[in-house]
Image: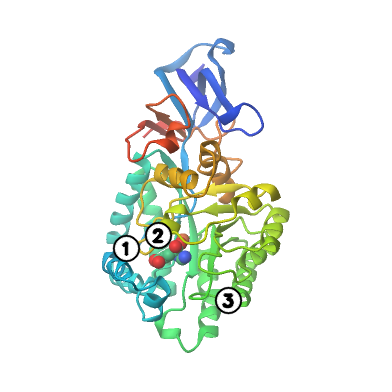
Amino acid sequence: MWDMLLTDCHAATMTAGGAPYGLIRGAAIAIDGERIAWIGKARDLPQAPARETHRLDDALVTPGLIDCHTHLVFGGNRAREWEARLAGASYEEIAAKGGGIVSTVHATRAASEAELAESAAQRAAALAGAGVTTAEIKSGYGLDVQTECKILRAAAAAGEKAHVRVMRTLLGAHVVPPEYQNNRARYVDLVCHEMIPTVARDRLADAVDVFCDTIAFTVAEAERIFAAAMAHELAVKMHAGQLSDQGAAALAGKYRALSADHLEHVSDEGIAAMAAAGTVAVLLPCAWYFLGAGRKPPIPALRKAGVRIAVATDCNPGTSPVLSPLMAMNMACTSFGLTPEEALAGMTRNAAAALGLQAETGTLEAGKSADLAVWKISNPAELAYWMGAPLLRERYLRGRSV
Ligand code: NIG
Ligand code: FE
């Protein structure tokens, strides 16, 4: 006997290669413990009884959404900086004057762990209310060992409070902090020899990210950090090509990074390296929009090379104060030209791959974690179509309604 049976629904399984969206009309989903035990057409159900049966009134069920790139833990906000940008200052100019990421670093260092956990939990709850069951959260607003660890602990606490599976990424290499401005190499040493070993020892993160760009780290510095991460058996990821092409995507491919993210500026060689390594391209259309809608990522070239494409909110105070995964999907379609099916794959199957979770979640398949979103719509294209509509009806994380 199954623990739970969901019937009278349509399931967009998001498995690749079959019907669009992997759609099963008239579906039933059986759950045992934390896992999907069976999914298919209700009329093919191999056994009927279950401890609990939920009839879903023809609702659409998808995998729980996965927001695979966020900076949810931070102190303060940057509305003032945004006003300055609207009045003509550029993101890079503000950063050069000690504003930007560094101003959030000051606010985050000043905040207590409990305060950070609470504000991040509210943001995680907003994502959850829009169907998210898994979110990646990066550090990167501490830039010293103690504060980076504080952020990563707060990230775990936020996920527990909001009932969201959280994958944590150390972004100690977000920018060079003010106290190392005249000695970048020593900061990179700190990241490699203190931050990464501490985070690995205390199991505070699953991966290490580097912001490789003009206002942040060079490719050579990123390579040192990747080598240190790999020596500690942490996966690597990269903020690549957001403001300029430094060759970051090619390095991401060389180190078999899980993902390279942003990619507004990326060469054909970078794309080829990502394709060869299976590195996922994570598109962040809300950050692109909020920074002024400049150059777009080369979607046709990514498709042609066979690079898997994910979509995320990039929620952060400087470039993407966005807590709506469906808005990110909408923008990925309207601004970058993804199909609604690609956008949903980008927030489910491919987002799971960007976090190394493809065996665990991201599609509706027997054996995977029962992470589901139940929606008040029947056509999956509507997820990327409506803007700002409260479409979620219910959410399951690891087999439990949350
Ligand atoms: O993904 N690119 C670097 N990191 C963030 C921006 C962070 C900030 O401005 O606070 C991003 O856009
Ligand atoms: Fe980011």
Find out whether the residues at labels 2 and 3 contact each other: C-beta distance under 8 Å.
Answer: no
Looking at the image, what colour scheme do you see? rainbow
Quarter of the image where the C terminus is located: top left
Q: Residue at x 48, y 76 (%)?
A: 215
Residue located beneath label 2 in the image: 153
Q: Nearer the viewer, mark 3 or mark 1?
A: 3
Q: Nearer the viewer, residue 367 or 328?
A: 328
Nearest to viewer (mark 2 / mark 3): 3
Whether pointer 2 and pointer 1 mark residues with C-beta atoms closer than 8 Å, the reply is yes
Badge 2 or badge 3: first in the primary sequence: 2
Under 8 Å from ligand 2: the CB of mark 2?
A: no
Query: Quarter of the image holding residue 209?
Result: bottom right
Query: Disc 1 residue type?
Result: Glu
Q: In this picture, is 76 found above or below 351?
A: below
From the top left corner, tell me how far across and down residue 401 is, in percent.
38, 31
- Give above or below for 397 relative to 221: above
Residue under label 3: 218
Residue annotated with mark 1: 113
Callout 2 crowding tier (Cα within 10 Å): few <14, some 14–19, many ≥20: many
Seen in the image, is 394 located left or right of residue 361?
A: left
What is the three-letter code of the residue carrying label 3?
Thr
Which is more N-terminal, label 1 or label 2? 1
Badge 1: few (under 14), some or many (20 or more) residues near its Cα, within 10 Å? many
Q: CA distance from mark 3 to mark 1?
A: 31 Å
Name the kind of residue labelled 2 in the image: Arg
